[in-house]
Amino acid sequence: MENETITVEQTVEWGLLSVFCLGAPASGIDEKGVQYPLSHASLSAEFPLGVSNHIIEPKARITVRKGALIVGWSCRLVALFPR
């Protein structure tokens, strides 16, 4: 997946959001509207930096420029981005 962005609406106060790479490491990841934002980060299975982040804005945005991600929030799998 290249240059893909999703927007997640905050459904509960301090809702959780987790981002995992799917397979090979993913890079160019931005997370905005969350407690621990990322900018041009890289994620791998060995270094799951995007786990258990809190949504603090009405909408959070997750962008990946290269690789595959699974994005989940509110305790359920929500989106699968294939390569």
Image: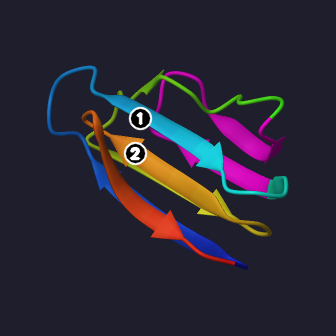
Give the camera-side residue of 6 and 73.
73
Image side of residue 45 versus residue 51, left or right = right
- Residue at 75% over, 44% down: 39
Give the camera-side residue of 51 and 64.
51
Q: Residue furthest front?
A: 23
Image side of residue 17 versus residue 20, left or right = left
Q: Secondary structure at mark 1?
A: strand
Res 46 quadrant in image: top right
State which region is magenta.
28-45
| Residue 49 horizontal/vertical position (percent) | 71, 28
Give the camera-side residue of 28 and 79.
79
| Residue 26 horizontal/vertical position (percent) | 80, 56
Dot 1 amino acid type: Leu
On residue 78, which mark appears? none
Image side of residue 9 versus residue 65, left or right = left
Dot 2 surroundings within 10 Å: few (below 14), some, or many (20 or more)?
some
Q: Residue tagged by mark 1? A: 17
Rounded to the nearest whole Å, what is the CA distance between mark 1 and mark 2? 6 Å
Q: Residue tagged by mark 2? A: 72
| Residue 21 horizontal/vertical position (percent) | 69, 50
The reply to whether dot 1 and dot 2 touch (C-beta < 8 Å) is yes
Dot 2 amino acid type: Gly
Image quarter in which the N terminus is found: bottom right
